[in-house]
Image (tube, grey):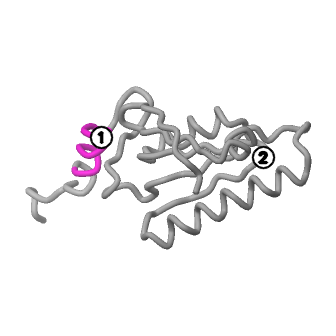
Amino acid sequence: SFPGYRGLTTRTIGVMIMVHADNKGLVLPPRVAAIQVVIVMCGVTVNLKEGERKALLSTCQDLEAKLNAADIRVQGDYRDNYSPGWKFNHWELKGVPIRVEIGPKDLSSQQLVAVRRDSGAKTTLPLS
């Protein structure tokens, strides 16, 4: 047995979590994060017309495909059984560096909102 190497992997992971975390969960640098960007559909309610919902979903999936083509690790969160706030918290806990929010109002304005995990800064960007 090599006493100097016992639990090295576990301790290394523990140190990484201690260094890259805050009170909300992990804060991972983009190079380390398994998912660099998450796309969250917002404003999907019972009152949203089916055509608008499909257009919103299509826009989100197109953006996801463009980011994938640019070698960015991206995942779309298109679940409609959770509120946007729940999804935001879920991805913050996992430490995803950038969250992209797109809703019906953003779609009509041809814009999106990008939120940084480390600083919480929100930036409005053109959709095209």
**Farthest residue, direction bottom:** 69
Q: Nearer the viewer, residue 29 or 64?
A: 64
Which image quarter: residue 113? top right
**Farthest residue, direction top:** 23
In the rendered view, does 79 fall on the left or right side of 122?
right
Query: In the image, which residues are magenta?
Result: 12-20
- In terms of secondary structure, where does tag 2 sit? loop
Lower position in the chain sequence, tag 2 or tag 1? 1
Q: Disc number at residue 80?
A: 2
Q: Disc number at residue 66?
A: none
Question: Residue at 36% of width from left, 40% of height from top?
Answer: 27
- In terms of secondary structure, where does tag 1 sit? loop
Query: Main SS of the magenta segment?
Result: helix
Q: Could you classify mark 1 by the number of other residues whose Cα lies within 10 Å: few (under 14), some (14-19), or many (20 or more)? A: some
Question: Residue at 59% of width from left, 61% of height from top?
Answer: 63
- State the image coordinates of residue 31 (x, y, percent, origin top left): 31, 58
Determine the CA span between mark 2 and mark 1: 30 Å
In the rendered view, does 26 fall on the left or right side of 8?
right
